[in-house]
Amino acid sequence: MIELEVISPERQILKLACVSVTLPGREGELEVLEGHTPTLIALKTGVLTIKGAQSNFDRMMVSGGFAEIDDKHVRVLAEVAATPDEIDAKSEEELIAKIKEKMSKLKEADDKEFRQLQASIERSMVKIQIL
């Protein structure tokens, strides 16, 4: 068993023992089992999958941040994270529609805001995916 801890800037989201964790790394997915080599990876927006955990869910959304891994622990320091019970699909779909409308009105010169809006859409889509 390994201990998984997920922390966002606002709070500790969970801390539990599990058999494995699959992380959405920027370089690809990474499954972590007990005895893993110590590693630090950058995370992208995606689904964190938990196997063999004593929790109400087995997947959650994480976006940005890092994961610190050693032989018995995975500590996820995510910029944004959400569990299925925190997500309302209808609200996320409405948010996506509003963001797309705003994006259609942006001037092409505002590339930074466009990328931020795209990232918001991606987070909402992953949230819906884990439901």
Image (cartoon, rainbow, N blue to C red):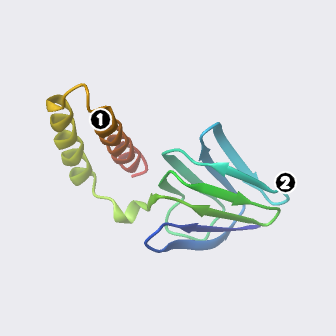
Q: Residue at x 83, y 62 (%)?
A: 71
The residue under label 1 is which amino acid type?
Phe
Q: Earlier in the sequence, mark 1 or mark 2?
A: 2
Please tell me whether mark 2 sits on a helix, a strand or a loop: loop
Left or right: residue 121 compared with residue 55 = left
Which image quadrant for residue 37? bottom right
Mark 1 residue crowding within 10 angstroms, few (<14) / some (14–19) / many (20+): some
Residue lying furthest front: 109
Q: Residue at x 39, y 52 (%)?
A: 131
The residue under label 2 is which amino acid type?
Thr
Mark 2 residue crowding within 10 angstroms, few (<14) / some (14–19) / many (20+): few
Residue 47 in the image: state x and y as whole percent: 51, 48
Q: Residue at x 58, y 48 (%)?
A: 43
Residue 4 in the image: state x and y as whole percent: 65, 67
Left or right: residue 87 compared with residue 51 = left
Q: Residue at x 51, y 51 (%)?
A: 64
Looking at the rendered structure, the number of numbered marks drawn on it comes to 2
Which image quadrant for residue 102? top left
- Assess whether mark 2 and mark 1 are in contact (beta carbons under 8 angstroms): no
Depth check, mark 1 against mark 2: the one in front is 1
Disc 2 target residue: 37
Disc 1 target residue: 114
Residue 116 in the image: state x and y as whole percent: 34, 42
Q: Nearer the viewer, residue 87 or 8?
A: 8
Residue lying furthest top: 108
| Distance between mark 1 and mark 2 Cα atoms | 38 Å
On-image quarter of the N terminus: bottom right
Residue 20 in the image: state x and y as whole percent: 70, 57
Label disc, if present, on residue 130 of the rendered structure: none
94, above or below 67, in the image: above
